[in-house]
Every structure is written in C-alpha cells, then in structure tokens.
Image (spheres, helix red, strand yellow):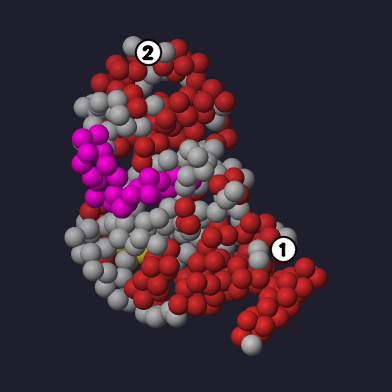
Amino acid sequence: MKKSLLFFLTIVSFFVWTCGPSEKTKKLAENAKKIFGTIPEKMPGSESDTPALVELGKKLYMDTILSGNDTQSCNSCHNILDKKGGVDNQPTSKGIAGKNGDRNSPTVLNAGFHIAQFWDGRAKDLVEQAKGPILNPVEMAMPSEKAVEDKLAKTEYAKLFQEAFPNEKKALTYENIAKAIAAFERTLRTTDRFDDFQNGDYKALTPAEIEGLDKFISVGCVSCHNGPLLGGNSYRKMGERNPYENTEDLGRYNVTKQETDKYVFKVPSLRNVALTAPYFHDGKAATLEEAVKKMAYLQLNINLEDKEIASIVTFLKALTDKQRDK
C-alpha cells in the first residue's frame, strides 16, 4: 500500500513538473532572486586581464616550483582538475614536510567574488591571498620574496613575465607573481542549475530540489547564506545560538584583536558545496548532512528532522557547477 501511494505521488509530481510551474514555484523563484541573485558574469578586476596574463597565472598555479622543495603547487590544496571543487577534501591540508595547517582549505572556485580571502578575511583580495601560502613555512615554505623571484628568473618564466607585463621594466616580481595567479583565479567562475531556475527556467530544478530550496529559506539558512554565492559576503560567529566545541581557533579575532570577533569567520559560499567536504573552518563535519544539522543547531537553535536535512541537502547538490556535475 505504501509503495503504491509513493508511486502515485511520484507520478503526480512528475506530471505537475512537466506540465508547467505552479504559482508557488514562480513565487519561490522570484523570492530566491531577491535573496540570492545570480553569479555575475565577470569577477572584479578581470576587466584588464589579458590572455597572456591568465595563461601565466594558470602555469604558476599548477607549478610546484613555487614551493621550497618543488612538491607543492597552489593546486595541491585547491584542486580544480578532474572536476574537483577547488579543495583537497582533507580536514586540513598537508604542507611540504607533511605538516598539516590549522584550517580547512576553502574553495578557490568563485573566490574572487568574496568579501575577502581566508577564513578570517586577513587578505583583502586574490592578489594579497596569493602571496601568503608561498612564504608560509608549513604550506610552500619559500624563504623570501627574492628567493622566489630568483628561482623563477632562471627558467622560461623570465620570458613569460615579460610577455604578460610588457610595459614594466622589471616584469618578474613577487607582486606580479601574485597578480598573475589572481588573474587566472578570476576565470574560475562556475555556472549551475540554480541560476537557471532564478532566471526563469523552472524545470532546471527537480520538484525535490525546489522543495529543498523552500525549506532552506523557511528554516532561516538565508540569514547567513545569502547573495549570489549563498555566502562569502559576511562574517559570523561560529556558534551564535549554541557554542561550537572548538574554542582553540579564535578566528577573525587574530586579525582585528576585537573581543567581538572571537570565533568569527567568513561565511563560506555554498556554491559547489557538495564537492568540498569535509566542512567548517576546522574540517570537523565529514558530510553535508552533518554540516546542515550542526549549523542549524549552532546558528539557529533548531534541531532539524532527518527528512528536513535530506531536503536541504538535495537543494544544495543543485549548486554544483555544470562542468563538474557530470
């Protein structure tokens, strides 16, 4: 009997979906566009990026030459190859000597749209962010900016930098290394079915995904995860309603030294979130289901039922880049 009822409801949902959107669906799409909006066509700063600069940045991003022992590249921790989500899918990343960093590697996909870079927002943009890991003693461990410049100057990079920065007398500088990497990262914009839905293609999402979107909004997830990236545009305390168990990482407080910034972190984007497990700044949530359940409790003081969690997760999986969702 239960199987027959489930089959009947599935058939009804299918015909409702194929025959055209309901007024409720249209209203939901309209509401979603007000809360979120679609990902902009271009990232800030990309207007002056040239093909030569982007290509140089891509080469640098993939090259282990930027690390002290030639084993680590930017892509090692922010993997964009083979349809990966711009992360290494580790709780915290391993550096050149096998040592682990203290935070989960955030995705580089769409990162140029964020309010700032790193979990604590200590880098104002992609250029400033690119300078950090190369000199970090745990991550890539180059001894100095000059050492990086000298190392690259002995290779084909000397010519490539001159081509990418034709109007500069000294083209191969640490600043320009970061500028080139940032130019490439500004091309890492993704597209997904949720934006198609917001733009009027109501069949871009399945009935279950639409239901999950409705639940995502009604539960209150949008109080933090809003804007085109569903996050990435604000800072929030980890544990606004109920305290988070990890009290060692003080978050943005380490940058600002403001008492109110203790345990405050940048709200992560949820675009491509299905590809970026494990979750949170410390990588402690192994699955998307666990992350949704815990965030609802920590931030909203809500204990979601399993079916509510499953519904929200179904929607979140629709935020995966089309090129990586195949």
The 10 Å Cα crowd at callout 1, few under 14, some 14 to 19, many 20 or more, is some
Numbered disc 1: secondary structure: helix
**Does 98 sit above or below residue 70?**
below
**Does 168 sit above or below residue 77?**
above
Residue occupying the far left of the picture: 248
Identity of the residue drawn at 65% across and 63% down: 205
- What's the residue type where badge 1 is placed? Lys
Q: Nearer the viewer, residue 173 or 298?
A: 298
Asked whether residue 310 is drawn in magenta, I would say: no
- Quarter-wise, where is residue 76 in the image? top left
Seen in the image, is 33 located left or right of residue 116? right
* Dominant secondary structure, magenta: loop
Q: Which residue is mark 2?
A: 155
**Does 321 sit above or below residue 259?**
above
Seen in the image, is 246 located left or right of residue 287? left
Q: Measured from the top left, where is residue 160 in percent x and y?
A: 46, 16
User: From where the camera sits, is residue 299 visible?
Assistant: no
Q: Which residue is mark 1?
A: 203
Q: Measured from the top left, where is residue 44 in percent x and y?
A: 53, 42
Identity of the residue drawn at 54% across and 22% down: 52
Q: Which residues are magenta?
A: 86-109
